[in-house]
Image (cartoon, rainbow, N blue to C red):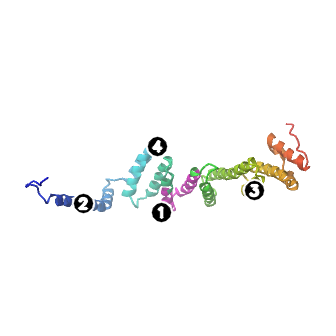
Amino acid sequence: MKMNANTNPQRPPLIAAVAVVAVALSVVAASCSGTSSKKLIKKGLYNCSERLQTAVKRMDRKNYTDAIRILDDVKFQCGGSPVMDSVYYYTAISHFRLKQYDEARAEFESLYAEFPRSPFVEEAHFRIAHMRYMRSLPSFRDQTDTREAMRLFNDYVDLYPRGAHVDSARVLYSLSLNKLAEKEFNNALFYRKQKEHNAALIYYRAVLSEYPESRFASEAVVGMAEMLVVLQRTREAAEAVGELDATAFDEKLRGRIEAVRQKVGGPAVEKDNG
């Protein structure tokens, strides 16, 4: 196809030139935005506290996405304002409510890094630990997050022994501990069903040595004794159940303790007549 004689061969370069100018103008506008924002604040046309309150009202209505948008704008407009620690805090809480834990953690970490004396710092430490706990996987999966949550809960209690969230931190620490113990305990049950008695014994002992305060500890003692009986290590089995107060356990577990004691020649379990 032949080019029309009236076609201007300079047109494409002209279009390119216009595009370059447009980009240049946008860069200039962006570079000036910080200055213009400060001017707006000085003139009273942008009120940082009022915008923060608007975001909080959005949060009260559970409109967390809109709240984050407003708070991000306040961050941009109000650097150095006394409300900035509150801005980071409410941004973090909004991400937390949306289950955006990575973003929430980043905001909390920025909060206590930039405003170490803020009244929100204590809660930031607790929330970061709590989010680790919430991200932890079921007991049969990898427990890296569970262990990290336990470490962070310990750090929180050490830093704030009378803190507002100490009781919650201790409860969540205990639940994390039980999750780790459950993993070892279930491994013991698996090998027991496979009649791999030595392997089962290893995992029962792991529960007792690593998580003696867990809710699986008592049953792990009995399971360990049962494995020792099967392996004909009766003296060790007798020692394992010898000091147990069987009356402290439920009927099923008392029956198992009685069975072990009969096999190793230990004292019979007293029956609960209550």
Quarter of the C terminus within the rendering: top right
Q: Is residue 213 left or right of residue 264?
A: left
Q: Which residue is drawn at 86% across and 47% down?
A: 260
Q: Which of marks 2 and 4 is nearer the N terminus?
A: 2
- Name the secondary structure under disc 2: helix
- Name the secondary structure under disc 3: helix
Q: What residue type is labelled 2?
A: Leu
Mostly what secondary structure, the magenta segment?
A: helix
The residue stretch that appears in magenta: 106-133
Q: Name the residue under label 1.
A: 114
Q: Name the residue under label 4.
A: 60
- Name the secondary structure under disc 1: helix
Cα–Cα gap, marks 1 and 2: 34 Å
Q: Which residue appears farthest toward the front when viewing the image? A: 1
Magenta highlight on residue 234: no
Assess whether mark 4 and mark 2 are in contact (beta carbons under 8 angstroms).
no
Cα–Cα gap, marks 1 and 3: 48 Å
Q: Name the residue under label 2.
A: 25
Q: In this view, does 226 lie to the left or right of 17?
A: right
Magenta highlight on residue 119: yes
Cα–Cα gap, marks 3 and 2: 71 Å
In percent of width and height, residue 7 lies at 10, 55
